[in-house]
Image: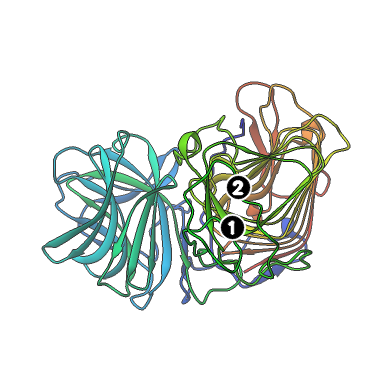
Amino acid sequence: MKHAKTGGRRRAVLVGVTAAVVAGAVGITATAFAGSTSLSDNFEDGDTAGWSKSGGSWAVVTDGSKALRQSDAASALARQFAGDTGWTDYTLSAKVRAVTLSGSAATAGIAARAGGAHEFDRLVLVPGAVRLEEVKGSAVTVLGSLTLASAATGFHTLRLDVSGSTVTGYVDGAKVGSGSAKLTKGRVGLITTSAAASFDDVSVTALAGAPATTAPTATATATASPTPTKTTAAPTTASPSPTKTATATATPTAVATSWPKATGTTTLTATKAVSGTFDGGNVEFIGGGALGDGGQDEGQDPLFQLADGATLSNVIIGAPAADGVHCAGSCTLKNVWWLDVGEDAATFKGTSASQTMTIDGGGAMHASDKVFQHNGPGTFVIKNFQASDIGKLYRSCGNCSKQFARKVQISNVTVTAPLKTLAGINPNLGDTATITNATIIGGKATNVCALFKGVTSGEPTETSNVPDGVACIATGITLK
């Protein structure tokens, strides 16, 4: 979908402050790293406080936005470490761009469970591919690999999940591989070998024992039916008609404390049309075929297409997620969970100014740009929702060829940084945003509302990054 691209990434800090009026809290300062399994840094402050260098030539540079660069391609092994040596199960993600990546020894990427300068699990870009490896001294064990023709060009989002004895790697939302690891705990790192690279938007969130906003990954099984007696079934192009289960909350009244576990897995190779009500029974749906490339390209088809008046409930959307959910008019998404957002989690289309899209309950993780995209007119309601590692929770289209005045109402949400903004709107087009009772963990006052000058072609320009009290009104905002 068309959307506004914004620069100005900001360092996400962990602060213990509550702000009733966010616009007045712009002077907050704090350290970037806390004692819990949580870390967020996008280097907008221009320094590397909290990181420890081992080899290479490192400096904060401008690479689109501020980024940390290792510029010595001759360095055999350059590393920056952060975090705690006692960290065990967590997700590490970062954007990585290879500046120089040539030769059989060249790598650039991220490391987890680093117990020393030569002991860690790593996910690295290499010429023409991405590799998942465990390094213990001179011994390197390859756990997975994926061909990536563009490895040496542009930023790629790398993500490592380390849980128990399993390590899993992803690049741009596509799974690289998974394997058994011997390492059990350690810090995180940014690494290069015989290469130069830029690093940005580094994030660590706990996988187990975490609060509501850092939810565990749902566990999928190889069944197509969520009924108590599970039967093995091959992936299908149409979803089952599962019965309702007790795992879902039909009418949530607060942000959930944990994510649901999948009762089965169904692969959709074509968009599933929904009219009326579809209850997924907490089955995990993933894209296959034309819906399964795991990319972030605009114009992808959705997994679910909702007709005007349709309701989608109790659905877990895994990876690849294609373009999530499209609504052709008024619709409701109740307790829908996105494990790894593709292009967008959900897009509101339609043509009527009276239509309403409601998101009630559920959550989303790992959205490189937007979670919810508003292209048509009408009102977008987001309530009782949680998210982590996202760009924007909501964005009113900044450059659609046909523009409308749009409204968004956000209430009772919890978002864990990295986060650019809760709501991005275009006041010059008549957009309004009302945000109440929102908690941002690891964020700033400038992560609440972004105001843009919307256009019908080209790129919109950002005019403000704090609520103005007119087009964007924010109350009951808590920064932690």
Apparent side of residue 444 relative to residue 310 in the rendered image (left or right)? left
Amino acid at the residue labelled 1: Val
Apparent side of residue 309 relative to residue 197 in the rendered image (left or right)? right
Q: Examine the image and state in which quarter residue 137 appears.
A: bottom left
Q: Is residue 102 above or below residue 394?
A: above
Q: Which residue is mark 1?
A: 283
Q: Is residue 349 above or below residue 447?
A: above
Q: Give coordinates of residue 50: x percent, y percent.
A: 39, 66
Inter-mark Cα distance, 2 to 1:
9 Å
Amino acid at the residue labelled 2: Ser
- Looking at the image, which residue is at 50% across and 64% down? 217
- The way the protein has been coloured in the rendering is rainbow
Which of the image's four quarters has the N terminus? top right
Q: Residues within 10 Å of mark 1 (few under 14, many from 20)?
A: many
Q: Is residue 442 above or below residue 359?
A: below
In this rendered view, identify the residue nearer to me: 39 or 250: 250
Number of disc labels: 2
As helix, strand or loop, the secondary structure at mark 2 comes to loop
Q: Is residue 69 above or below residue 284?
A: above
Q: Give coordinates of residue 215: x percent, y percent.
A: 55, 67
Q: What is the number of the mark on residue 429?
A: none
Q: Which residue is mark 2?
A: 239
In this rendered view, identify the residue nearer to me: 403 or 128: 128
Disc nearer the start of the sequence (2/1) = 2
Q: Which mark is in front, 2 or 1?
A: 2
Q: Examine the image and state in which quarter residue 74 appears.
A: top left
Q: Give coordinates of residue 228: x percent, y percent.
A: 59, 69
